[in-house]
Amino acid sequence: MARRSRQSLGRTQQGNLSFAKLQVELFGDFETYIGSSRRASVGKSATLSKPTIRLLIRRACREIRNHRSLRMRAAKRLDGPISLQVVFLSVQKIRRLNREFRGRDYATDILAFAPAESTSLGELVICFPVMIRQARQHGHSVQHELYYMLLHGILHLLGYDHERDLKEARRMFKIQDDCWNEFR
C-alpha cells in the first residue's frame, strides 16, 4: 500500500453516504466514466451511478466485515466512525501515481493509500478505463469488476499485501474470492 501526503487529485464532484459509522466520499469526473461504463457493459447490465457505486462500497465493506477470518481485524477498522475516499482517475493520472508511489510505469486498475488521519480507512484510486478493459477480458459487467476491485482495495487498506509473500497473497485472494462469490 502506498503512502502519500494529502493532495487534490482533480476532485470535481463529490457525494457522501453514511453507512453505520462509515462516511464514503466519491471524487472524480463521474459523468465521463459512467457514460463509458454503459457502453462497455458485458453480460449483465451495469449502469454505474453514484448511488450504485456507493451501494457497492457499502456491500464490499459489509462482506469483508462479516468474513469469518476477518471479523476481528475488520471490526477494529470498520466499526468506528471512519471515512473512505474513492477517487476515479484517467489512465494518464493513475499511471503517474503508480510510477510515483510504486515505481511501476503503467496504468493500474486500483491503488490503495494509507489514511492520513486516524478517522480514515484510507483512499482508493480507481482507473475506470482499465476497469472497463478488465471487465471485457473477464466477460462480466463493469459493476462486477468495480465490486471486485473495491474488495481488493479495502483488503489492502486493512493491511493485506499480496506482493509481500505467497502465503499472504493466498490468504488475501481467498478472502477476496469468498466475498466475490457472495456477490455473484
Image (cartoon, rainbow, N blue to C red):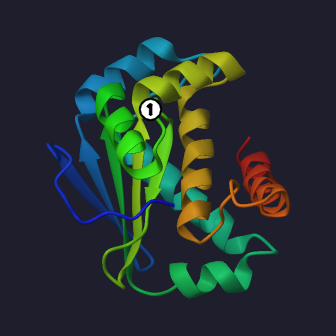
Q: Amino acid at mark 1?
A: Asp
Toward the top, the furthest residue is 39
Q: Is residue 11 left or right of residue 163?
A: left
Where residue 65 sits in the image (x, y, percent)? 65, 73
Which residue is at the front of the view, 137 or 49?
137
Image position of 125 with respect to 21: above or below: above
Identify residue for label 1: 105
Q: Quadrant of residue 184?
A: top right
Q: Residues within 10 Å of mark 1 (few under 14, many from 20)?
A: few
Q: Is residue 11 left or right of residue 171?
A: left
Image position of 29 with respect to 6: above or below: above
Q: Is residue 158 left or right of residue 101?
A: right
Where residue 102 sits in the image (x, y, percent)? 47, 49
Where residue 124 sits in the image (x, y, percent)? 42, 54
Circle 1 SS class: loop
Image position of 81 with respect to 144: above or below: below
Q: Quadrant of residue 61?
A: bottom right
**Residue in view at x 79 percent, y 47 percent:** 181
